[in-house]
């Protein structure tokens, strides 16, 4: 197998990410078109509206000009989308899609392993800062009352298995820092399961019992960390962070269920 230069493979990851994003948007447009069709039917309007099609093409071409895109490109893309929308709205075509389709909209959202390469493009210092901030907020209370003393000078890892991301945390006085080097013990799980744990939508005990979370390395340090996660004082986490985590974890769980349902 030929070995690609790093820059080429990073740029290809970027291109893949943009292709995925475009297809997600196309799926979103089709869903809106299905709703539009139902709305027009209820209002007694015809499915096709040539004046609106011209307007869509003109708008798109105007934007394409401002973006410096080749003139035929935007027109070609938009014509394809409109033709697809017409097929979708034509009961004879056999391609209709219900506006109330039971397929979850979260099927549009690719699973973490698809967008992980994009996340890995985020510069390491930014990732480190975000991690320090989130974990620092989550653990502010236990750090304040000394419950994390066992971590002074010890290195605990957090590994997000499906994103291929890992950080090593060390408690330095009252501050949790992301440091370089090997972890003495690590807590490993998928992005969704770690979010479910952080948001308290699932408890640490059952996540570890079902082996969705794992502790590796120094058993004593790992188990102490695990017990701490179990007893995290959720009430002391700032309300805004709790709401964000809760929403994020629910969305990640629904997306995972939608993708699992799709594979079934
Ligand atoms: O705007 C509508 O009514 C649509 O159904 C969407 C759409 C489009 O794809 O933009 C498709 C068919 C119509 O003829 C006009 C526009």
Image: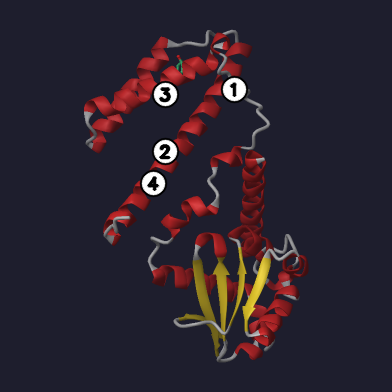
Q: Is residue 178 left or right of residue 210?
A: left
Beta carbon of the mark 1 residue lies under 8 A of ligand 1: no
| x and y, in percent, of residue 29 in the image | 49, 29
Disc 1 element: loop
Q: Nearer the viewer, mark 1 or mark 4?
A: 4
Disc 4 element: helix
Are discs 4 and 3 less than 8 Å apart at CB?
no
Q: Earlier in the sequence, mark 3 or mark 1?
A: 3
Q: Which residue is mark 1?
A: 97
| x and y, in percent, of residue 160 in the image | 56, 65
Quarter-of-image position of residue 20? top left
Nearer to us in this view, 263 or 144: 263
Q: Earlier in the sequence, mark 4 or mark 2?
A: 4
Disc 3 element: helix
Quarter-of-image position of residue 82? top left
Q: Which residue is mark 2?
A: 22
Nearer to us in this view, 37 or 108: 108
Query: What's the CA distance linking mark 2 and mark 1?
Result: 20 Å
Query: What's the CA distance linking mark 4 and mark 2?
Result: 10 Å
Q: Earlier in the sequence, mark 2 or mark 1?
A: 2
Vertical relation: 133 (above or below) 191: below
| x and y, in percent, of residue 108 in the image | 55, 39
Q: Earlier in the sequence, mark 3 or mark 2?
A: 2
User: Can I make out residue 185 in this image?
Assistant: yes
Q: Which residue is mark 3?
A: 81
Picture quarter with the C terminus = top right
Q: Earlier in the sequence, mark 1 or mark 4?
A: 4
At x 39% / y 16%, what residue is drawn? 53
Tag of residue 21: none
Tag of residue 16: 4
Vertical relation: 218 (above or below) 30: below
């Amino acid at each position: 197998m030929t070995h690609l230069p790093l820059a080429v493979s990073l740029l290809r990851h970027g291109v893949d990410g943009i292709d995925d994003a475009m297809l997600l948007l196309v799926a979103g447009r089709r869903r809106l078109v299905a709703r539009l069709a139902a709305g027009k039917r209820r209002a007694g309007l015809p499915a096709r509206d040539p004046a609106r099609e011209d307007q869509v093409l003109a708008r798109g071409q105007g934007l394409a000009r401002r973006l410096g895109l080749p003139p035929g490109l935007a027109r070609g893309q938009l014509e394809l989308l409109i033709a697809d929308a017409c097929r979708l709205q034509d009961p004879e075509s056999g391609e209709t899609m219900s506006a109330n389709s039971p397929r979850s909209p979260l099927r549009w959202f690719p699973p973490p392993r698809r967008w992980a390469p994009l996340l890995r493009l985020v510069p390491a210092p930014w990732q480190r800062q975000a991690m320090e901030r989130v974990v620092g907020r989550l653990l502010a209370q236990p750090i304040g009352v000394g419950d994390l003393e066992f971590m002074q000078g010890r290195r605990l890892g957090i590994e997000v298995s499906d994103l291929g991301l890992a950080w090593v945390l060390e408690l330095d006085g009252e501050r949790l820092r992301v440091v370089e080097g090997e972890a003495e013990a690590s807590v490993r799980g998928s992005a969704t399961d770690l979010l479910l744990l952080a948001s308290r939508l699932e408890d640490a005990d059952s996540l570890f019992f079902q082996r969705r979370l794992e502790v590796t390395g120094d058993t004593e340090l790992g188990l102490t960390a695990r017990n701490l996660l179990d007893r995290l004082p959720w009430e002391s986490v700032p309300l805004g962070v709790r709401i964000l985590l809760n929403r994020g974890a629910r969305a990640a769980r629904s997306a995972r269920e939608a993708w699992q349902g799709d594979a079934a």
